[in-house]
C-alpha cells in the first residue's frame, strides 16, 4: 500500500509512481479527497486514507490547478519525472488526516 511506503520514507516523500501511475494528483479539496477515499479506495482496497501536506508555493505555481469534474474537484498534476523535485519541496511531514475502513 502506498501509505506504507510513505511511512517507510519517514512521512517526508511520496514513493515513485508505478508504471500505471504516470502522474501524482494532489487533490486540493478535502471533501473530494474524502469522497475518493470512501467511495473508491475502501471499496477497491478495503481502506482509504486522506493525507495532508504542504508544498512550497513557488514550486506549485508551475503546476496549474485543474478542475477535473467541477468547481469542487481541483487537482494539481505532477508527472512521475518531477516527483523527486516535488518531494524536495514538501514542507514538513505528510500527515494522515482521515482513515476509513
Image (cartoon, rainbow, N blue to C red):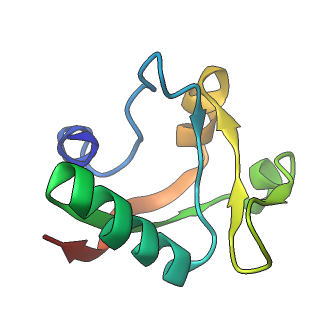
As displayed, is residue 40 above or below residue 81? below
When asked about the image quadrant of residue 77, the answer is top right
The answer to whether residue 95 is left or right of residue 26 is: left
Q: Position of residue 19 (x, y in %)?
A: 46, 16
Quadrant holding the N terminus: top left
The answer to whether residue 45 is left or right of residue 97 is: left
> What's the residue at 44%, 75% (across, down)?
35
Residue 85 visible in the current orientation: yes
The answer to whether residue 6 is left or right of residue 69 is: left
As displayed, is residue 72 above or below residue 77? below
Quadrant holding the C terminus: bottom left
> What's the residue at 67%, 39% (across, down)?
78
Q: Position of residue 65 (x, y in %)?
A: 81, 60
User: Total number of numbered labels?
Assistant: 0
* Along the viewing direction, whichever of 73 and 25 lies nearer the viewer: 73
* Along the viewing direction, whichever of 23 and 97 lies nearer the viewer: 23
Q: Position of residue 56 (x, y in %)?
A: 68, 58
> What's the residue at 60%, 77% (across, down)?
29
> What's the residue at 69%, 59% (across, down)?
75
* Along the viewing direction, whichever of 54 and 39 lies nearer the viewer: 39
Residue 50 visible in the current orientation: no
Amino acid at each position: 500500500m502506498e501509505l506504507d511506503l510513505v511511512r517507510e520514507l519517514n512521512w517526508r516523500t511520496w514513493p515513485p509512481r508505478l508504471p500505471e501511475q504516470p502522474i501524482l494528483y494532489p487533490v486540493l479539496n478535502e471533501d473530494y479527497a474524502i469522497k475518493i477515499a470512501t467511495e473508491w479506495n475502501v471499496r477497491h482496497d478495503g481502506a482509504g486514507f486522506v493525507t495532508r501536506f504542504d508544498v512550497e508555493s513557488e514550486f506549485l505555481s508551475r503546476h496549474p490547478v485543474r478542475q477535473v469534474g467541477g468547481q469542487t474537484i481541483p487537482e494539481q498534476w505532477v508527472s512521475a519525472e518531477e516527483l523527486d523535485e516535488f518531494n524536495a519541496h514538501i514542507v514538513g511531514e505528510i500527515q494522515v488526516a482521515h482513515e476509513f475502513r
